[in-house]
Amino acid sequence: GNLEDMKELVELAKKGVIKPIISKHYELPQANDALEDLKERKIIGRAVINP
C-alpha cells in the first residue's frame, strides 16, 4: 500500500471497524527478538514493542 492506504487503515482502526491482531508484546530491549520472530514467522499478526 501507500501512504493514503495507511491513513485510511488508521482511521478505520480508530473507529473500531478493523482491529489489528497483536500476537505478542515485547519490551524495548527485546526489539531485535521481535524482528527476528517476525522474520522467522514465529508470530502471526503484529508485534508490539513497549517503551
Image (cartoon, grey):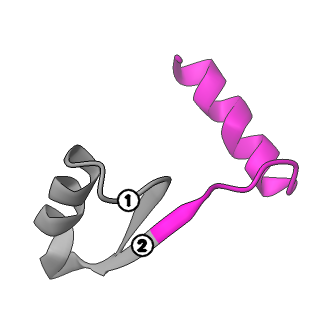
Residue at label 1? 43
Q: Which residues are magenta?
A: 1-23
Mark 2 Cα shell of 10 Å, populated few (<14), some (14-19), many (≥20): some
Examine the rendered structure and indicate whether residue 10 appears above or below residue 43.
above
Residue drawn at x 69%, y 37% is 9
Give the CA separation, mark 2 to mark 1: 7 Å
Q: Residue sitting at 52 percent across and 17 percent down? A: 2
Pointer 2 with pointer 1, Cβ within 8 A: yes
Q: Is residue 5 above or below residue 18?
A: above
Quadrant for the C terminus in the image: bottom left
Magenta span contains residue 10: yes
Position of residue 8 relative to residue 44, above or below, is above
Q: Check disc 2 and report the residue beneath it.
A: 24
x, y percent for residue 28 = 22, 77
* Camera-side residue of 41 and 26: 41
Q: Which residue does the image show at 63% across and 20% down from the upper left? A: 4
